[in-house]
Image: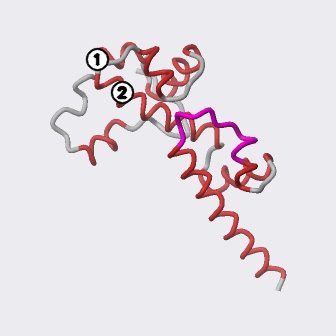
Amino acid sequence: MADRDAQEQRLRDIVVIRRVRDRIDREYAEPLNLEALARGAHMSVGHLGREFRRVYGESPYSYLMTRRIERAMTLLRRGDLSVTEVCFAVGSSSLGTFSTRFTELVGVPPSVYRRDHSRAAEGIPPCLAKQVTRPVRNQEARSP
């Protein structure tokens, strides 16, 4: 009986963690922090972090930054916003942190990406462009 209760609790936790992930996906440009996400999920910060990592293989913060970088890549390819404008548009409050994380995930600084990849997804259907241009997840970009 205890095993069944533990299994049911684990399934309930997965549902809650999916809702947290969905909230991050929707509100990536808002100032989200782990305390607010945990409060919304009715979990402690530690439990949320452990469960999120167990389910998705990365911390909630890492997932949030990946979402922000994905959106930033799209905005930079458009080419009508500066790197600073893109940084703030995706919810980052520090240009330095944004640039560092962008470079870690994508392999080039945002200014270079903006200059060199403005046509990276040209001619590719949007459903495929997202897959082709997605940053590396759970690891740093490979060195050139």
Residue denoted by label 2: 75
Residue placed at 56% from the left, 25% from the top?
Answer: 92
Disc 2 secondary structure class = helix
Q: Name the quadrant containing residue 91.
A: top right
Q: Viewer-nearest of labels 2 and 1?
A: 2
Q: Main secondary structure of the magenta part?
A: loop
Q: Position of residue 29 (x, y in %)?
A: 52, 34
Is 3 part of what is drawn in magenta? Answer: no
Amino acid type indicated by mark 1: Asp
Point out which mark residue 12 bears.
Answer: none
State whether residue 84 is above or below residue 92: above
Element marked by disc 1: helix
- Where are the magenta residues, as a range? 27-37
Classed neighbour count for the residue bearing mark 1: other residues with Cα under 10 Å, few (<14), some (14–19), many (≥20): few
Residue 35 image point, x, y percent: 75, 41
Residue 96, located in which quarter of the rendered image? top right
Give the residue at x 27% y 48%: 127
The residue lying at 57 percent from left, 51 percent from top is 21
Residue position for label 1: 116
Q: Earlier in the sequence, mark 2 or mark 1?
A: 2
